[in-house]
Every structure is written in C-alpha cells, then in structure tokens.
C-alpha cells in the first residue's frame, strides 16, 4: 500500500472518530493506545484481529446473536476502573466476552488481584492465554483463568467483584446474561460491580431495583453513552435495607 493511500485511510478514520467522539476523546484514545500497546508489546502481548471468526463463534453460541464489535480502548478501561471504590490490588475481574484478553492484560498491567475471561472464540482464547502467561513471565503477580464458556450460562465465582462487558451480544443474550448475574446475586455476601462499555442494553440492568447506576459517561453526543457502571447490592445489604425500612415503617405507625 502506498504511503499516501495509507495516510488517507488513517485520516478518514480519525475524522470519523472525531465526528462521533469529539477531538479530546479521540486524541485521548489514541494516546492511551500508543502508551499501553508499547508497554504490553515489551511483555510479549499482542492482539491479532479475530473478527473473521465471528460466524463460527456465533454458531457455537446459545442464541446466535454475537456481533462484531470494536475493542475496548485503553482509555475507556482506565477511566472505568478509576471510578470503582476498590483498590487496584483488590479487584477480581471477570471479562465476559474477553476475546484475546485486552481487558485481562490491562488488569494484569494494573496489578489487579485476579482476572478471568470467558469466550467461545477458541483461537482468541489461546492468544489470551499466551498473553497472560507472557505477562506473568515478565513479573505480573496477578492470577488469571481463561475458559471456553457461553455467556448465558457462565458461572460467576463468589471471589469475583467486578464483571466487565463490552456489549458483544444481541438483546436476547444480554437479557440472559443479566438474569444470570442477578440469579447469582441472590445469596451473594459481597457487592458486585458491573462495568458495561458501549451499554446498548443498559435498561436491562436498570430494570432491577437492587442494581444501582453509580456512573455513566457519554461521547460527543450526550445521548450516546459510552459506559455505565452499576453496583448490585449483596444479600446482606439488601436484608439490612429491608429491615430498616420495616422498622421505620413500624416506628411511624406507633407515632401515628
């Protein structure tokens, strides 16, 4: 490809991003991308394009509504995890739809306590495994696990305190994922945080009273959210809240 053609293509992509995100966000995305890719490449981490595997991955899924998506930007990842009331070395993350492990590599670079990823794309999972192993060989102390699993039926370990999603599914699968998370929370003793990037179906989380939105940001168009963060209350906190409401209600009855 001639240099002029390459530069023109890059400029067109830049202009498209600016129209959608604005200049500041576009430049931040580019700066973080250069910085983290440079740091991770030195540790043997790469992220090949596995979009060609989409059709095969879709056939393996329960609802067959996986769709092609852009990868999580390192700027978005950095911003998202900075909004959590958790210390970095206490974050235990599950990435649903992890692909080649971009979010996992970010977590290991940030010294999370543990990162886990699930996906159905086997070549991408193999690359994620290679990336995580390479990072440990270069000094990362973050524990990791990677599993081939469907998002609708995945088991969420009680040790996980953050679930990360980059809207990789259609409406039906997202509904199943949300229902699965909520079912898991019925007897959970610890709060769970959901980072939902490109939150196309965020109303599915909003439908549950125990799920509280604690942060949301948008692109240039304020109506286009780029990220929503939810906190789902533990069983213990829900029980305490319910007891307090009952007590306050009874106290008011006595006063009346």
Image (cartoon, rainbow, N blue to C red):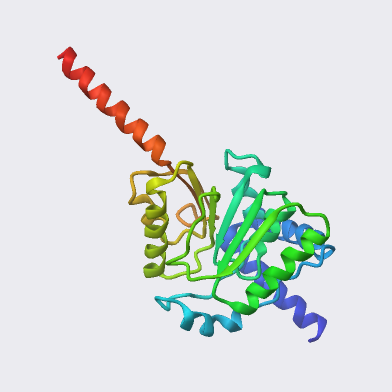
The foreground one among 2 and 140 is 140
Q: Where on the picture, by quarter, is residue 65? A: bottom left
Q: Residue furthest bottom?
A: 1
Q: Whole-percent x and y of residue 157?
A: 52, 54
Can I make out residue 50 in this image? Answer: no
Q: Residue 155 placed where, x, y %?
A: 48, 61
Which residue occupies the foreground of this view, 8 or 188?
188
Residue extending furthest left?
256
Q: From the viewer's perspective, is residue 28 above or below residue 256?
A: below
Q: Quadrant of residue 94?
A: bottom right
The spot of residue 215 in percent (x, y) is 50, 44
Which residue is pictured at 76% across the width and 58% down the height?
Answer: 36
Asked if 50 appears above or below 88 in the picture, the reply is: below
* Up/down of 239 relative to 219, above or below: above
Is 82 displayed left or right of 2 in the figure?
Answer: left
User: Residue pushed farthest top?
Assistant: 255
């Amino acid at each position: 490809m001639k240099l002029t053609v390459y530069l023109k293509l890059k400029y067109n992509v830049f202009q498209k991003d600016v129209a959608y995100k604005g200049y500041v966000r576009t430049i931040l995305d580019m700066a973080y991308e250069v910085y983290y890719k440079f740091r991770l490449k030195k540790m043997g981490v790469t992220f090949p394009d596995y979009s060609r595997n989409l059709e095969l991955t879709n056939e393996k899924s329960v609802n067959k509504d996986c769709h092609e998506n852009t990868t999580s930007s390192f700027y978005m990842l950095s911003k998202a995890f900075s909004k959590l009331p958790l210390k970095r070395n206490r974050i235990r993350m599950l990435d649903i739809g992890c692909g080649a492990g971009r979010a996992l590599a970010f977590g290991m670079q940030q010294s999370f306590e543990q990162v886990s990823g699930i996906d159905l794309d086997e070549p991408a999972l193999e690359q994620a495994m290679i990336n995580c192993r390479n990072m440990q060989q270069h000094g990362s102390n973050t524990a990791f696990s990677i599993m081939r699993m469907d998002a609708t039926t995945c088991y969420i370990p009680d040790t996980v305190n953050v679930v990360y999603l980059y809207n990789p599914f259609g409406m039906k699968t997202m509904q199943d994922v949300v229902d699965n998370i909520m079912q898991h929370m019925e007897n959970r003793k610890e709060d769970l945080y959901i980072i939902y990037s490109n939150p196309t179906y965020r109303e599915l989380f909003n439908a549950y009273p125990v799920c509280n939105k604690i942060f949301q940001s948008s692109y240039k168009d304020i109506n286009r959210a780029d990220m929503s963060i939810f906190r789902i209350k533990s069983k213990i906190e829900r029980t305490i809240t319910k007891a307090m409401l009952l007590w306050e209600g009874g106290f008011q009855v006595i006063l009346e």
